[in-house]
Amino acid sequence: MPVSDYQMVKAWDEVLKLSKVERGQKVSILCGPHTHPQTLQTATIAAQAAGAVVTRIELQPINAEKAPSRDLMNYLGETPLTNNPVALAAMKNSDIVLDLMLLLFSPEQMEILESGTKILLAVEPPEVLVRAVPTEADRERVLAASKLLKAARKMHVTSPAGTDVTFKLGDYPTISEYGFCEEPGRWDHWPSGFLFTFANEGGSDGTIVIDRGDILLPQKNYVSDRITMHLREGFVRSIEGDIDAALLREFMEAYKDPEAYAIAHIGWGMQPSCYWHTLSLVDREATSGQDARAFEGNFLFSLGPNNEAGGPRTTPCHLDIPLRNCTVKLDDVVVVRDGKVIDEAFQ
Ligand SMILES: O=c1ccc(O)c[nH]1
């Protein structure tokens, strides 16, 4: 349903409080012509109400000639912040940046975070943001799970559809997303509620079957016939299936970048306020698909860049693929069984 400004301001109030935005702090709101006006206006009001010094930084979009669609995650890495020292300096001098434009997987994002500035990404439409306002409980639950993921040296994922893949772990950090930034230098995404790490270089082997009903992002569609990926030494070596596989192959080939086939982040969803089915209810261009990334019990794997975690790959081709009904095992502990999160594993 449509969201009232009052409701959206209250949602921002909660998120800014959880992010410890205090009187006198410097809040920069990064936006572009595609930013949702209600999100921008209510973020500005809530930041002022928190007593912050508020600056809006509007940047013009780039890469339209390179990206196959308007989706914000269709072409990552270069952003309107690239070669813009004026805006970069403003953000490095802020306590928090509310990113309503999307900097994900960009060197500039890393540079801003290293300066101690917090970055909270929020590009979902207001009705999604209001439905999935984060809570302290989300943070505690995701952090409890991340303790196990940090200590794991192997992830084994299976499914009735035929997925049977093993990832060697330990070389990359674990990233927890729970929708707010309470520590300096932290990046988060509202809404979220999931966690992931990146597989060791060359350490991913086996088969991933994207089953009927599983989701491809940024395509934002439910796969209608199975896609089978064979992985060897960290890269997808073949993508087999019918029309969905052919579309995915052509999408990836268009980037002309071998790094597009590299396994990137792997993890699972833990957000009870996000759902598998909602993608069928929203305008595809209005959402970046966070419901699909965060819904409880998915196994989420991605392909492409891993610079976010200090890895060497910066390919602009980034796919996020959440699967249902998987069983995820860390060393010998099952954390998701048949698509259900096993909370006892994190106690
Ligand atoms: O929130 C996000 C969104 C995309 C992604 O690849 C990771 N986390």
Image: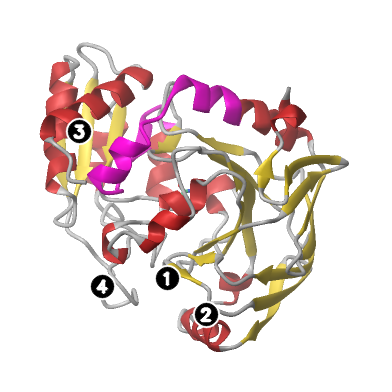
Mark 2 or mark 3: whose residue is earlier in sequence: 3
Magenta highlight range: 114-142
Residue tagged 3: 8
Q: For the residues marked 3 and 1, what is the alpha-carbon distance in whole angstroms?
A: 28 Å
The residue located at (31%, 28%) in the rendering is 96
Which secondary structure lies at badge 2?
helix
Mark whose residue sits in front, 2 or 4: 2
Residue tagged 4: 64
Image quadrant in which you'd find residue 203? bottom right
Q: For the residues marked 1 and 2, what is the alpha-carbon distance in whole angstroms?
A: 9 Å
Mark 2 or mark 4: whose residue is earlier in sequence: 4
Which secondary structure lies at badge 1?
loop
Q: Is residue 55 shown to the viewer in this render?
A: no
- The verdict on residue 131 being magenta is yes
Mark 3 or mark 1: whose residue is earlier in sequence: 3
The residue carrying pointer 2 sits among few (fewer than 14), some (14 to 19) or many (20 or more) residues within 10 Å by Cα, namely some
Please tell me whether residue 327 is drawn above or below residue 173 in the rendered image.
below
Residue tagged 2: 248
Please say if the residues under marks 1 and 2 sit with CB atoms less than 8 Å apart: yes
**Which kind of residue does numbered mark 3 sit on?**
Met
Q: For the residues marked 1 and 4, what is the alpha-carbon distance in whole angstroms?
A: 17 Å
Which secondary structure lies at badge 3?
helix
Mark whose residue sits in front, 3 or 4: 3
The residue carrying pointer 1 sits among few (fewer than 14), some (14 to 19) or many (20 or more) residues within 10 Å by Cα, namely many
Q: For the residues marked 2 and 4, what is the alpha-carbon distance in whole angstroms?
A: 20 Å
The residue carrying pointer 3 sits among few (fewer than 14), some (14 to 19) or many (20 or more) residues within 10 Å by Cα, namely many
**Which kind of residue does numbered mark 4 sit on?**
Ala
Mark 3 or mark 4: whose residue is earlier in sequence: 3
Q: Nearer the viewer, residue 213 or 5?
A: 213
Please tell me whether residue 302 is drawn above or below residue 107 in the rendered image.
below
Residue tagged 1: 219
